[in-house]
Image (tube, grey):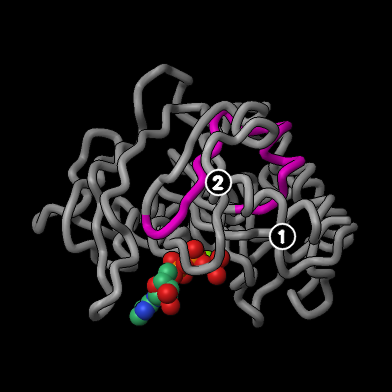
Amino acid sequence: MPPTSESDVLIIRNLKKKFGEKTVLNGVSFGVKRGETKVIIGPSGAGKSTLLRCINRLVEPDEGEVIFDGINVLSKDVDIRKIRARIGFVFQHFNLFKHLTALENVKIGPKVVKGLSDDEAEKIAVKALKAVHLEEDAFEKYPAELSGGQQQRVAIARALAMEPDIILFDEPTSALDPQLAGEVLDVMKELAKKKVTMLVVTHEIGFALNAADEVLFFYNGRIWERGEPRELLYNPKREETKAFLRRIADLSL
Ligand SMILES: Nc1ncnc2c1ncn2[C@@H]1O[C@H](COP(=O)(O)OP(=O)(O)OP(=O)(O)O)[C@@H](O)[C@H]1O
Ligand SMILES: [Mg+2]
């Protein structure tokens, strides 16, 4: 990872997106500094996934700016593949290659995208798999032979192996049983402690309290409320935030 500094690695300014007549992002602005973990919460349909997808242009925003490490990502002459190679993405459904082992899934990025030798890629992959505490007997297994928690940890290792400037997570534990979710969240908490820069969509309030520098509450395509985790989660100011947090609390009882 690049050295920690106070500079914003990602700046989002006034981002807007419509699908047909429906406004999904309605002027979103925030920054993520190197070494920071930011958590996004908010109801279904609020635009959280769309926001993450705009950052690496899996979705093209209609208006606004995405500045990544000083580069204007939305400019026409940007080589988006180069940008994507520097931004990790971990999805709800692990998206591993089914015909490759855990180790091969993690090696393939450094080899194919970065052009490293097999030996170099293997060293990096082993280090990344150890960082997510994948059991060594699982290195040679195929995704179908791994638990959901192991698969998601491999997906995180795959992102780490590219030494990205930031990793985006879109509800990485919502498809997992609580115990398996716990092992993934523990890995993510460790990464936060190691100052890996992360932008995480999740409803895991415990993770937000433990690891986030700031929580953004999304509602109707906007940042409705934002703040230091304890403040926002225990003492929200706006009615919509209160109602959302009550609903989350009810679900976890
Ligand atoms: N490719 C698309 N085409 C049309 N509409 C879309 C597309 N992607 C998302 N939408 C719509 O945009 C809105 C926001 O979707 P998005 O997936 O960003 O919400 P979200 O906050 O991630 O919700 P969830 O918590 O359910 O994942 C939804 O109404 C969704 O149906
Ligand atoms: Mg979503």
Residue 190 horizontal/vertical position (percent): 73, 34
Residue at mark 1: C-beta within 8 A of ligand 2: no
- Residue 204: give x, y in percent of width and height: 72, 49
Looking at the rendering, in which quadrant would you find the C terminus?
Answer: bottom right
Residue at image x 16%, y 56%? 63
For disc 2, the neighbor class at 10 Å (few under 14, some 14 to 19, many from 20) is: few
Q: Residue at x 67, y 53 (%)?
A: 203
Tell me which image quadrant ligand 1 sits in.
bottom left
Asked whether residue 89 appears in the rendered view, the answer is: yes
Q: For the magenta stretch, what is the residue range?
A: 202-221
Q: Is residue 92 magenta?
A: no
Q: Name the mark on residue 81.
A: none
Contact between marks 2 and 1 (CB within 8 A): the answer is no
Compared with residue 2, is residue 144 higher up or lower down, i.e. above or below?
below
Is residue 131 something one can see in this rendering? no
Dot 1 corresponds to which residue?
173
Q: Is residue 49 left or right of residue 19?
A: right
Q: Is residue 214 magenta?
A: yes
Q: Where is 174 relative to 245, above or below?
A: below
The residue identified by callout 2 is 239
SS class of the residue under badge 1?
Answer: loop
Q: Position of residue 106 (x, y in %)?
A: 61, 59
